[in-house]
Image (cartoon, rainbow, N blue to C red):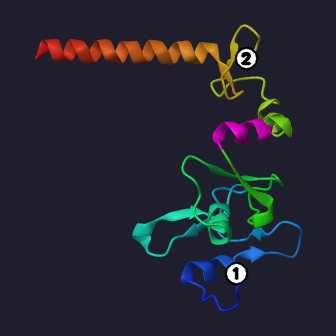
Protein backbone atom coordinates (compact mmCIF):
# COMPACT_ATOMS: atom_id res chain seq x y z
CA UNK A 1 0.00 0.00 0.00
CA UNK A 2 2.97 2.31 -0.34
CA UNK A 3 1.65 3.69 -3.66
CA UNK A 4 -1.18 6.13 -2.86
CA UNK A 5 -2.52 5.71 -6.42
CA UNK A 6 -3.20 2.00 -5.82
CA UNK A 7 -6.96 1.33 -5.95
CA UNK A 8 -7.92 -1.04 -3.15
CA UNK A 9 -9.73 -4.24 -4.02
CA UNK A 10 -12.82 -5.25 -2.00
CA UNK A 11 -10.81 -7.80 0.02
CA UNK A 12 -8.15 -5.18 0.80
CA UNK A 13 -10.84 -2.74 2.01
CA UNK A 14 -12.30 -5.42 4.30
CA UNK A 15 -8.80 -6.39 5.46
CA UNK A 16 -7.87 -2.84 6.54
CA UNK A 17 -11.20 -2.39 8.37
CA UNK A 18 -10.47 -5.41 10.58
CA UNK A 19 -7.12 -4.31 12.01
CA UNK A 20 -6.28 -2.55 15.26
CA UNK A 21 -2.85 -1.03 14.53
CA UNK A 22 -2.65 1.03 17.72
CA UNK A 23 0.12 -1.14 19.19
CA UNK A 24 3.30 -2.82 18.05
CA UNK A 25 1.33 -5.74 16.60
CA UNK A 26 -1.43 -5.09 14.09
CA UNK A 27 -4.13 -7.16 15.77
CA UNK A 28 -6.84 -8.80 13.70
CA UNK A 29 -10.26 -7.92 15.17
CA UNK A 30 -12.36 -9.86 12.65
CA UNK A 31 -13.38 -13.53 12.67
CA UNK A 32 -10.99 -16.04 14.26
CA UNK A 33 -10.35 -19.77 14.07
CA UNK A 34 -11.06 -19.91 17.83
CA UNK A 35 -10.75 -17.61 20.86
CA UNK A 36 -6.96 -17.19 20.69
CA UNK A 37 -6.51 -18.50 17.17
CA UNK A 38 -5.67 -17.01 13.80
CA UNK A 39 -7.66 -14.34 11.97
CA UNK A 40 -9.98 -15.37 9.13
CA UNK A 41 -11.23 -13.39 6.14
CA UNK A 42 -13.52 -14.39 3.28
CA UNK A 43 -11.96 -14.26 -0.17
CA UNK A 44 -15.04 -12.58 -1.63
CA UNK A 45 -17.65 -14.95 -3.01
CA UNK A 46 -18.85 -17.84 -0.86
CA UNK A 47 -17.44 -20.42 -3.27
CA UNK A 48 -13.99 -18.81 -2.98
CA UNK A 49 -13.80 -19.78 0.69
CA UNK A 50 -11.81 -18.15 3.47
CA UNK A 51 -8.14 -17.61 4.22
CA UNK A 52 -6.00 -16.82 7.21
CA UNK A 53 -5.60 -13.06 7.70
CA UNK A 54 -1.83 -13.17 8.30
CA UNK A 55 -1.38 -15.03 5.00
CA UNK A 56 -3.43 -12.40 3.19
CA UNK A 57 -1.34 -9.68 4.83
CA UNK A 58 1.82 -11.38 3.53
CA UNK A 59 0.39 -11.61 0.02
CA UNK A 60 -0.76 -7.98 0.01
CA UNK A 61 2.66 -6.74 1.07
CA UNK A 62 5.06 -9.31 -0.44
CA UNK A 63 3.27 -11.18 -3.20
CA UNK A 64 2.39 -14.87 -3.45
CA UNK A 65 3.50 -17.28 -0.74
CA UNK A 66 6.07 -19.73 -2.12
CA UNK A 67 4.80 -23.31 -2.47
CA UNK A 68 5.28 -25.40 0.66
CA UNK A 69 5.97 -22.39 2.88
CA UNK A 70 4.15 -21.24 5.98
CA UNK A 71 3.81 -17.67 7.20
CA UNK A 72 5.33 -17.47 10.66
CA UNK A 73 5.21 -14.76 13.34
CA UNK A 74 8.31 -13.22 14.93
CA UNK A 75 6.01 -11.81 17.63
CA UNK A 76 4.31 -15.18 18.36
CA UNK A 77 0.91 -13.46 18.23
CA UNK A 78 -1.40 -15.49 15.95
CA UNK A 79 -3.71 -12.47 15.52
CA UNK A 80 -0.89 -10.19 14.31
CA UNK A 81 -0.98 -9.25 10.62
CA UNK A 82 1.82 -6.67 10.64
CA UNK A 83 4.06 -7.48 7.65
CA UNK A 84 7.30 -6.75 9.53
CA UNK A 85 6.29 -9.40 12.11
CA UNK A 86 5.80 -12.10 9.45
CA UNK A 87 8.33 -14.34 7.70
CA UNK A 88 8.23 -17.43 5.52
CA UNK A 89 9.41 -20.80 6.71
CA UNK A 90 8.83 -24.50 6.23
CA UNK A 91 6.75 -26.43 8.75
CA UNK A 92 9.98 -27.82 10.24
CA UNK A 93 11.50 -24.34 10.57
CA UNK A 94 8.30 -23.05 12.17
CA UNK A 95 8.30 -25.92 14.68
CA UNK A 96 12.00 -25.38 15.50
CA UNK A 97 11.25 -21.67 16.04
CA UNK A 98 8.37 -22.66 18.32
CA UNK A 99 10.58 -24.96 20.39
CA UNK A 100 13.47 -22.44 20.48
CA UNK A 101 11.14 -19.77 21.85
CA UNK A 102 9.70 -22.15 24.46
CA UNK A 103 6.17 -21.99 23.06
CA UNK A 104 5.70 -25.66 22.32
CA UNK A 105 5.67 -26.67 25.95
CA UNK A 106 3.43 -23.97 27.43
CA UNK A 107 0.23 -25.92 26.99
CA UNK A 108 1.25 -29.51 26.43
CA UNK A 109 3.98 -29.81 29.06
CA UNK A 110 1.43 -29.28 31.81
CA UNK A 111 -0.55 -32.33 30.74
CA UNK A 112 0.09 -35.47 32.75
CA UNK A 113 -2.30 -37.69 30.75
CA UNK A 114 -3.18 -38.28 27.12
CA UNK A 115 -6.68 -37.29 25.92
CA UNK A 116 -7.92 -40.81 26.82
CA UNK A 117 -6.57 -40.54 30.37
CA UNK A 118 -3.46 -42.72 30.11
CA UNK A 119 -0.51 -41.36 32.11
CA UNK A 120 2.40 -39.72 30.32
CA UNK A 121 5.20 -41.76 31.87
CA UNK A 122 8.61 -42.55 30.41
CA UNK A 123 7.50 -46.06 29.47
CA UNK A 124 4.18 -44.96 27.97
CA UNK A 125 5.37 -41.89 26.03
CA UNK A 126 7.19 -41.35 22.75
CA UNK A 127 8.27 -38.16 20.99
CA UNK A 128 7.74 -37.87 17.23
CA UNK A 129 10.03 -36.13 14.74
CA UNK A 130 8.21 -32.81 15.32
CA UNK A 131 8.83 -32.97 19.06
CA UNK A 132 5.22 -33.87 19.93
CA UNK A 133 4.51 -36.25 22.79
CA UNK A 134 2.29 -39.31 22.18
CA UNK A 135 0.79 -42.10 24.26
CA UNK A 136 2.17 -45.57 23.42
CA UNK A 137 -0.95 -47.34 24.73
CA UNK A 138 -3.24 -45.25 22.49
CA UNK A 139 -0.97 -45.95 19.50
CA UNK A 140 -1.16 -49.68 20.24
CA UNK A 141 -4.96 -49.55 20.55
CA UNK A 142 -5.24 -47.63 17.25
CA UNK A 143 -3.03 -50.19 15.49
CA UNK A 144 -5.08 -53.12 16.87
CA UNK A 145 -8.34 -51.49 15.79
CA UNK A 146 -6.93 -50.84 12.31
CA UNK A 147 -5.81 -54.48 11.98
CA UNK A 148 -9.24 -55.70 13.20
CA UNK A 149 -11.05 -53.50 10.63
CA UNK A 150 -8.75 -54.73 7.85
CA UNK A 151 -9.38 -58.36 8.86
CA UNK A 152 -13.17 -57.82 9.00
CA UNK A 153 -13.09 -56.14 5.60
CA UNK A 154 -11.13 -59.03 4.09
CA UNK A 155 -13.55 -61.55 5.62
CA UNK A 156 -16.54 -59.68 4.19
CA UNK A 157 -14.94 -59.73 0.72
CA UNK A 158 -14.31 -63.48 1.02
CA UNK A 159 -17.95 -64.08 2.07
CA UNK A 160 -19.28 -62.49 -1.13
On residue 1, the disc is 1
Image coordinates of residue 31 in percent, x first then y, are 64, 67
Residue found at the very far top of the displayed protein: 123
How many marks can you see?
A: 2
Which residue is disc 2 drawn over? 119
Image coordinates of residue 42 in percent, x first then y, are 53, 70
Residue name at image x 64 percent, y 40 percent = 91
3D distance between C-alphas at marks 2 and 1: 52 Å
The residue range painted magenta reads 90-98
Q: Which of the pair 50/59 is nearer the observer? A: 59
For residue 102: magenta? no
Image coordinates of residue 155 in percent, x first then y, are 22, 12
Considering the image in quadrants, where does the C terminus appear?
top left
Of the residues under marks 2 and 1, which one precedes in the sequence?
1
Residue name at image x 65 percent, y 18 percent = 135
Element class at badge 1 = loop
Relative vertical location of residue 107 with respect to residue 7 in this rendering, above or below: above
Q: Would you say 125 lies left or right of 25 here?
A: left
Q: Quadrant of residue 154?
A: top left
Residue name at image x 56 percent, y 17 percent = 139
The main secondary structure of the magenta stretch is helix
Element class at badge 2 = loop
Amino acid sequence: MSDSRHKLTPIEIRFWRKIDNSGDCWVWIGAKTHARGYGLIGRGRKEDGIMLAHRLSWELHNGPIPAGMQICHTCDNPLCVRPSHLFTGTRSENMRDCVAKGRSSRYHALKTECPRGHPYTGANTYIDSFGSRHCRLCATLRARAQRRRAKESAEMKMAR
